[in-house]
Amino acid sequence: MSVIDKQAVKQFLMELQDSICHQLEQADGKAQFEEDAWQREPGERLGGGGRTRVMRNGDVFEQGGVNFSHVQGKQMPASATAHRPELAGRKFEAMGVSLVMHPNNPYIPTSHANVRFFIAEKEGEAPIWWFGGGFDLTPFYPFEEDCQYWHNTAKEICAPFGSDVYSEHKAWCDKYFYLPHRDETRGVGGLFFDDLNQWPFDKCFEYMKAVGLGYTDAYLPIIERRKHTEFGERERQFQLYRRGRYVEFNLVYDRGTLFGLQSGGRTESILMSMPPLARWEYAYQVEPSSPEAELYDHYLKPREW
């Protein structure tokens, strides 16, 4: 049985945050991340701290954030124990890196990634632990080659861990990043996994590492291909409209957002994922056979890449 090494996980996550921030700053070429390190006061419901890093008004990115957090609590929120009653009465720790990048150019997709580790402990009983994470892509004006590249990178990440891992975690992503009230996926998916503890700790940890490190391998080449594409007000307005879907998903369905808010997490860091600007329009309809219609017709539904 593998030894559960919480400190090794934390060290990796902090180094991952550093690496991703450095690579995204290089891709932008202008803006840099500003860090807001935070620590919870003793006696608060949720202890711990983190490093919130936000980039604004860059040449590539309008806004984006890459967060590291490590929090501890004496008991799980009621919403969590309702689904996982075995967690009741246990103290817990949760640590992870979570990021969302919102580009200026509508031809560059929004991207999201998250890798995390959770452990709940109780004296005299074996700990309950798991890893989770993934990454997904949300284009506004999709290119087939970009979506294929994104998914091919995901396949390569998963391949050393089993022949079925990509297909399972790709399908999980399609199912998770889905808006039932809109009957559409948030984007073109990628990978999503949670409650990963079926393998020994070391193998689960290695998979989480591979997904975290693979995010920039999947995203940066797409940025380079699209960052000089010209756009106008039409594309900008459609981008802002589609960003509204991102807000709807994160506030209504995203488990990480809900867990953070319900457990007394740091609100500014949790809501860092929101776009700086978004819009809604009553009964909006795309023009048939338009570039905007292509997104709805060919990309906002699960498909094989």
Image: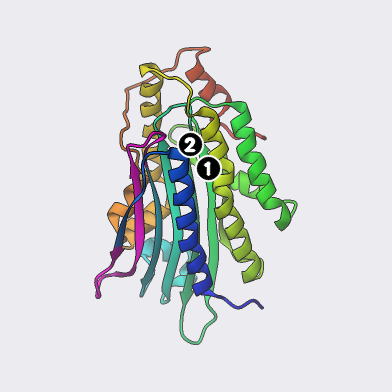
Residue occupying image coordinates x 48% and y 19%? 292
Quarter assignment of residue 202: bottom right
Which kind of residue does numbered mark 1 sit on? Answer: Asp
Task: Return the disc, 1 or 2, that comes first in the chain's sequence.
Answer: 1
Which kind of residue does numbered mark 2 sit on? Answer: Arg
Q: Is residue 220 above or below residue 89?
A: above
Q: Tell whether label 2 touches label 1 (CB within 8 Å).
A: yes
Q: Is residue 110 above or below residue 172?
A: above
Q: Which mark is residue 186?
A: 2
The answer, for residue 167, to whether it is visible in the render is: no
Which of 218/298 is in front?
A: 218
Instruction: Name the chief secondary structure element in magenta.
Output: strand
Q: Residue furthest bottom?
A: 124
Over which residues does the magenta segment extend? 38-63
Q: Is residue 83 above or below residue 1?
A: above
Give percent across and percent down for residue 152. 67, 40
Give percent across and percent down for residue 261. 32, 56
Instruction: Name the quarter where the N terminus is drawn.
Output: bottom right
Residue occupying image coordinates x 28% and y 54%? 267
Q: Is residue 59 magenta?
A: yes
- Label 1, residues with CA under 10 Å away: few <14, some 14-19, many ≥20: many
Residue occupying image coordinates x 42% and y 62%? 80
Mark 1 lies on residue: 136
Q: Is residue 299 magenta?
A: no
Residue occupying image coordinates x 41% and y 20%? 235
Give percent across and percent down for residue 287. 46, 13
The answer, for residue 104, to whether it is visible in the render is: yes
